Amino acid sequence: TESWILMATGRTPTNIAVIKYWGKRDEALILPVNDSISVTLDPDHLSATTTVAVSPTFDRDRMWLNGKEIPLSGDRFQSCLREIRKLADDVEDEKKGIRIQKDDWQKLHVHIASYNNFPTAAGLASSAAGLACFVFTLAKLMNVKEDCGKLSSIARQGSGSACRSMYGGFVKWTMGKDASGSDSIAVQLASESHWNDLVIIIAVVSSKQKETSSTTGMRDSVETSPLLQHRAQTVVPGRILQMEEAIRNRDFASFARLTCADSNQFHAAAYTFDAGPNSVLIAPNRKSAGLLLQRLLFCFPPPAHNELTSYVIGDKSILH
Ligand code: PMV
């Protein structure tokens, strides 16, 4: 057998949604119940770097994440790999004397190694960076000529939010209407240079893997939350238009108001404010209240002479 190896490396940043995607209308194809808008971050900070290699000596597709081999059996990676293979084209590397023809890609296996330079699966959209990078780098290796819009619809099938990482700057994922998902793609609203005064600070409070995956969370919300339907059908369409305008005009006040309002809708029963600046947090039971307090004290340790710390739960003061 021949023993050449051909590689491609790509780096893709994650993105943070300011109008969020939450809820799928089709779980297999990952079609959302609403449009969403995000900001793609700077690749130096939160990004995935992926190297894809192909060689006739590889006997199966394999993948390593942060140095550890992970099964490639999951539907999502498989869907992306299958879709990219379908679009693969001839590749010629004269120096190495390699000629791969379109149809050869069906038989050739790939090895994929990906690293995240930030905590994985801790709610920082690591899957967005990872899956977008996976699709982008495979497409480079396999000489796929389709545009970023088409690639975004493939990345979407790996992780919904990944489609938005196909572009830098401000990006909208249009939910689309088609049952096949062909129009459920990302489009760039404005490039990174459009509003380069804007700074996004990510405060990592915990880098532990989150307990509930977004897939499970979304499924539960779709099945049980009356708020979700209202959000998707009535609230988000208006917010999307206003957010597009805020971005176009670099209007920070509107951008901030919409971003906070959209985030707050996800925490719609956990806190309330009265007329002043002090927050009232509500936990569903004593156990979660304990955890909440621990986190609160970790983030805001009470100074020696603290006038404002009084945590009251039910009829008992826990701390003064
Ligand atoms: O694409 P997923 O399955 O990682 O879902 C991500 C959903 C949120 O990050 C919570 C919101 C969003 O629009 O990115």
Image: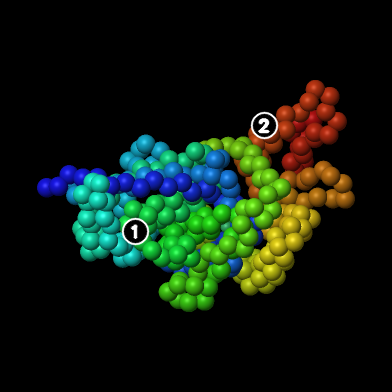
Residue 258 shown left or right of residue 52 in the figure:
right
**Does 212 appear above or below 185?**
above
Task: Say which mark, if any, is on residue 122.
Answer: none
Q: Residues within 10 Å of mark 1 (few under 14, many from 20)?
A: some
Depth check, mark 2 against mark 1: the one in front is 1
Give coordinates of residue 122: x percent, y percent.
53, 43
* Relative image position of residue 73 (x, y in whole percent): 31, 53
Q: Is residue 71 visible?
A: no
Establish if 135 lies above or below 126. below
Q: What residue type is labelled 1?
A: Asn
Q: Which residue is drawn at 65% across and 34% down?
A: 294
Quadrant hosting residue 290: top right
**In-image side of 208 versus 269 (left or right):** left
Judge: label 2 CB < 8 Å from ligand 1.
no
Q: What element carries label 2?
A: helix
* Residue drawn where x is 22% and y is 51% of the image: 98
Specify whether tag 1 is near ligand 1 (CB below 8 Å): no
Cα distance, mark 2 to mark 1?
A: 50 Å
Q: Position of residue 120 (x, y in %)?
A: 48, 42
Q: Residue 143 carries which label?
A: 1
Q: Which mark is residue 298?
A: 2
- Residue at point 32% right, 50% down? 72
